[in-house]
Image (tube, rainbow, N blue to C red):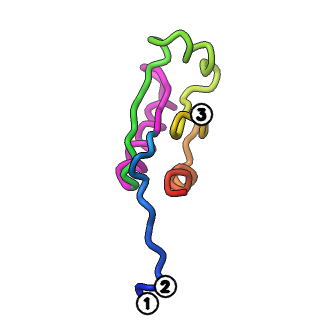
Amino acid sequence: MSPLLRRAKKKADGRVVTLIGKPGCHLCDDARAVVEEVCGRTGAVWEEKDITLDEALHREYWEQIPVVLVDGEQHTFWRVDPERLRRALEA
């Protein structure tokens, strides 16, 4: 295929993924692995917040952890689909 017709993959530079979870949560561990891998491939920055240390996060997300935010907006909760996260970051 001609390089002119090939789509360039977008990088997720400047995008921020936030994982909200708590220690000892196996779903949070699974989500962390997905977020770390997808962000590593796309170039997005990611951070993790502990729901047990932030009362506002606890009130808002307690029943949904792990929660993943993309640029401050809720993307998903409980299970993280790597392809869906990648598409969101490259959009």
Label 1 to label 3: alpha-carbon separation: 42 Å
Q: Is residue 68 above or below residue 9?
A: above
Lower sequence index among marks 3 and 2? 2
Which residue does the image show at 48% across and 12% down from the upper left? 54
Label 2 to label 1: alpha-carbon separation: 5 Å
Are the residues flagged by discs 2 and 1 in contact, CB closer than 8 Å?
yes
Tell me the tag on residue 78.
Answer: 3
Front-lying residue, 60 or 79: 60
| Residue matched to label 2 | 5
Question: Horizontal and vertical percent for residue 62?
Answer: 60, 18
Q: Which kind of residue does numbered mark 3 sit on?
A: Trp
Question: Horizontal and vertical percent for residue 32?
Answer: 43, 36
Magenta highlight: main SS? helix
Question: Horizontal and vertical percent for residue 87?
Answer: 55, 56
**In screen coordinates, is 42 left or right of 89?**
left
- Quick check: is 38 in the magenta stretch? yes
Element type at marker 2?
loop
